[in-house]
Image: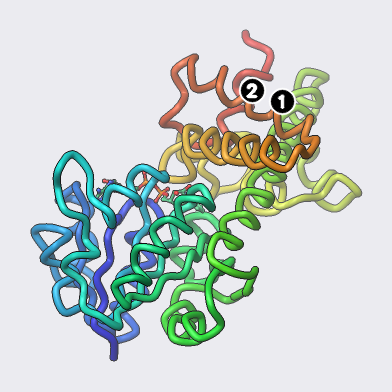
Amino acid sequence: MANIAFIGLGNMGAPMAINLAKAGHQVRAFDLSREAVAKVVAEGGSAATSAQEAVEGAEVVVSMLPASQHVEGLFLGHGGQAGLLQGMAKGALIIDSSTIAAATSQKVAKAAQALGIGFIDAPVSGGTGGAIAGSLTFMVGGSAADLERARPLLEKMGKNIFHAGDVGAGQTAKICNNMLLGILMVGTSEAIALGVANGLDPKVLSEIMRRSSGGNWALEVYNPFPGVQEASAATRGYTGGFGTDLMLKDLGLAQESAMTVKASTPLGGMARQLYAAHSIAGHGAEDFSSVIKMLQKKG
Ligand code: NAD
């Protein structure tokens, strides 16, 4: 069984860490939030009081942090503070599952490799439901050898494991996927709002579209209209899912990437504008499916 440090225990990280602990691995958990650490300790992990303490002697370090600056700051250091790489054992492996810029993954990987530490970017898809069920999809960038070392752990957290290419390729696949998801969520919300404004029952309309040519993942498992699906974030008051500001970050990464290669992504650009407006209106911390609110008829 592996000695694992798990850093970042939010909506996704906590259930992923718990699945590793349940599989019998030694999981030393750290998050800036003590509450988040306590959740993982209650399910078999052990608490670390700092990220440095968590990685001491760890064979594998898994990180699940919000954005590029958090991952870069954690591993390479910031504000005069040394990064985690300095305290990690030679031969250890980093599995970074955060969704961040491919260039940041490459920068951290280069610094890690110079110290004899392996690195893969392994962002995920599947939402909090997939994290809890251990059925996530991993999109991996890195060497085949590092992926094979990580595979037994990834298999405890996910069902589908894809090798996208070299370091950074997992991130590129992930932002393509999330650009499509952002567009699909806006489209799905628009269609439901239109039907409801015309007097249709959102449950009936959703089921018709789910089984018709408009069917997509949002309609399958992530319906944006409250009450249509019992387990959806919408039904929980748009809490505990994938934050609007995280989707906005991913759509921004997609646009940056598009500019670099001169790709045309008009719908991705429009989706980014809509999520930015939604965030500015005060919905940044709510689940991203709350974007339906800006499309619904008031009163
Ligand atoms: P979250 O905001 O719920 O959790 C992030 C956690 O990181 C928080 O608990 C925070 O306290 C912690 N953190 C931040 N900086 C830290 C640091 N320096 N040291 C230790 N802990 C720190 O976010 P999430 O929804 O779990 O998402 C995490 C990543 O996964 C993001 O990159 C997101 O884009 C991606 N993602 C999320 C989902 C989803 O459905 N929520 C799905 C796929 C991918």
Q: Position of residue 48 (x, y in %)?
A: 12, 64
Q: Position of residue 42 (x, y in %)?
A: 19, 67
Q: Which residue is mark 2?
A: 274
* Local secondary structure at mark 2: helix
Residue 229, compared with residue 123, is above or below; it is above
Q: 10 Å neighbourhood of mark 2: few (<14), some, or many (≥20)?
A: some
Q: Is mark 1 within 8 Å of ligand 1?
A: no
Residue 42, compared with residue 198, is above or below; it is below
Q: Position of residue 15 (x, y in %)?
A: 37, 63
Q: Which label lies toward us, 2 or 1?
A: 1
Residue type of the residue flagged with mark 2: Leu
Residue type of the residue flagged with mark 1: Met
Q: 10 Å neighbourhood of mark 1: few (<14), some, or many (≥20)?
A: some
Q: Which residue is mark 1?
A: 270
Residue in view at x 45 percent, y 51 percent: 104
Give the alpha-carbon distance from disc 2 to disc 1, as whole Å. Answer: 6 Å
Residue in view at x 29 percent, y 72 percent: 115
222 or 72, nearer to the observer: 72
215 or 37, nearer to the observer: 37
